Amino acid sequence: MSDLTETEVWLALKRHYAEVRRQHMRDMFDSDRQRFDRFSLRLNDILYDYSKNHITAETLGLLLKLAEEAQLPRWIERLFSGDAINHTEHRAVLHTALRARAEDKIVLDGVDVVSQIRNERQRVNRLAEAIRTRDWRGVTNQPITDVVNIGIGGSHLGPLMVTEALRPYTLHDLDVHFVSNVDENHINDALEFLNPETTFFIISSKTFTTQDTMVNAETARQWFIHQVGSDEQIQRHFAAVTSNATLAREFGIAEENIFSIWDWVGGRYSLWSAIGLAIVIAIGSRQFDLLLEGARDVDVHFRESPLERNIPVIMAMLGVWYNNFFNAQSMAILPYDQHLHCFPTYLQQADMESNGKCVDRSGQAVDYSTGPVLFGEIGIAAQHAFFQLLHQGTKLVPADILAPIYTVRCIQRHHRALMSNVFAQTEALMRGKTAAEARREMGEKGLDPAEIERLLPYRVFPGNRPTSTLLFKTLDPKTLGSLIVLYEHKIFVQGVIWNINSFDQWGVELGKQLASTIRQELNDAQEVTSHDCSTNGLINYYKRHRPVNKPPT
Ligand code: F6P
């Protein structure tokens, strides 16, 4: 048994779970007309309703006690003040500094981090605005019409998600494309209709060694050079965002087009840094400032609010409740705003790369469940795909629903239909449908009694399925910034409770190592024997059946 699962408060939560698990949320609502008021919070333009969760006041009290005992307030201070809390990489974790005000003072190893960030942001803004205003010209003196961001993971998902989410704020005559997959189809599809003379590439890679990104970057360079010109000319058409300026220079990128990120920014928390260059080009520096402002508002809220009124803390502790006491294995993210279609995938990396860990901070294997399997989809689409399982399946899948009060044009016919689904689904998941209700409903439709009894088991909905709803005014940059950071801090809090390091990602290394060996083995037609028989079999089958049985050129 670990320290965590032996604590008084953990044991109290276990006992409490045994007492309340059979209670139905329907009864909780029926017996408490104030439940919505008691279990909802507001922050700027965001309403967070967590009343449709399987909790009582006592549950919350115990969960917050658990947070107190994990010394959450101290950890929050350690995060913001730049302590090296990423202890396996000896690094501070300072993505919050990327949102700091000019007057804030954050010093790390004697360096004034805030002015470092500000300087880099000014450089990013200058390039982005020059491209947006058509002042930046390519080698044939034409303005840029297309920007291609080449990156993967944190160097891709954040910029992609934000650019998609803020589509109404983008320019019509400047397209931003994203390429991440090393499968040539991705870059070929992106480049197919582009003109190299009006295309600008951003090579986004913190390390500048990630294989997928570097292979794509080389293809982009060759595509450009074959059609337009020489190695020197790529300087008007390529930029890099990286902490490895040496490799970017070797690639041929001009010094003034190399933008820095620092080792204290984790890839999955980096969209606020120069990694956001594609976003700034897409929406402009003023809107990007608003994105940062929304992010900062949540930083302040998180740092200063008492735990019981702290939205990321409540979000996190509800997750712990389901994960560790209800044994829920997963969690669904269901945006009802089409522009948030990349949000679930973005959060997958943020959450699962952060909290998918089985060893605690002292190197011991944990004996409790950590990060959930996070998945999601646009809510409306999901209703017609996997909601069946949410309503009547055997698994408990707590879900977050995100929805806007108004959209860009807000055509009532569309928006009312959309929102009716938001409210209906959360109600249906919570209340379900009893046998009596199902019987009455079928009776009213004129079904004969025998048929009613035959169908009854299928027509009953157990309900008692938890959802939390984030209702926001509209998806503007500021609100988006806030929404993202609510989840960033939720993930951090859960890491604190589970006593894991949410900021390393050693688990992605093994596959990379093996791939680099196997890549060499694919260079010739020789039979491979160095792996297990399945891996050998697959490699050898591939070698025998690939179209060209000679080393790649
Ligand atoms: O493979 C995982 C990872 O290291 C992520 O953590 C990171 O966001 C991504 O790869 C890309 O890394 P880089 O920006 O160094 O290319």
Image (tube, rainbow, N blue to C red):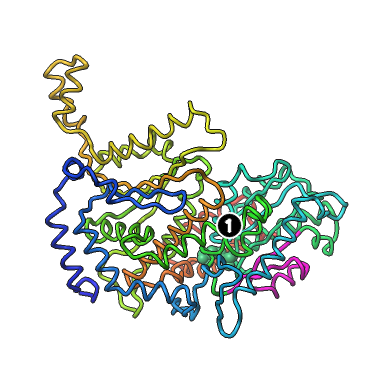
- The percent position of residue 284, horizontal first and vertical second, equals 67, 52
Is residue 519 visible to the viewer in this orientation of the structure?
no
Position above or below: 106 against 379: below
Position above or below: 231 against 290: below
Give yes or no for residue 242 being in the magenta stretch: yes
Position above or below: 218 against 333: below
- How would you rate the neighbour count of disc 1 (Cα within 10 Å): few for under 14, some for 14-19, many for 20 or more? many
- The percent position of residue 234, horizontal first and vertical second, equals 80, 60
- Classify the position of the N terminus by image quarter: bottom left
**Total of numbered circles in the picture?**
1
Front one among 98 and 36: 36
Point 42% across, 60% down: residue: 351
- The percent position of residue 500, horizontal first and vertical second, equals 36, 72
- The percent position of residue 529, horizontal first and vertical second, equals 48, 67
Point 43% across, 65% down: residue: 354
Is residue 163 visible to the viewer in this orientation of the structure?
yes
- Residue pointed to by mark 1: 156
Name the residue at the bottom extreme: 110
Point 71% across, 44% down: residue: 192
Q: In the image, is 13 to the left or to the right of 183? A: left
Front one among 36 and 210: 36
Quick check: which quadrant has ligand 1? bottom right
Q: In the image, is 44 to the left or to the right of 228? A: left
> Does ligand 1 reach within 8 Å of label 1's beta carbon?
yes
Region of the chain picked out in magenta, as a range: 238-262
Q: Quarter-wise, where is residue 322 in the image?
A: bottom left
Point 70% across, 41% down: residue: 172
Give yes or no for residue 429 being in the magenta stretch: no
Indicate the amino acid at tag 1: His
Assign a secondary structure to mark 1: loop
- Classify the position of the C terminus by image quarter: bottom right
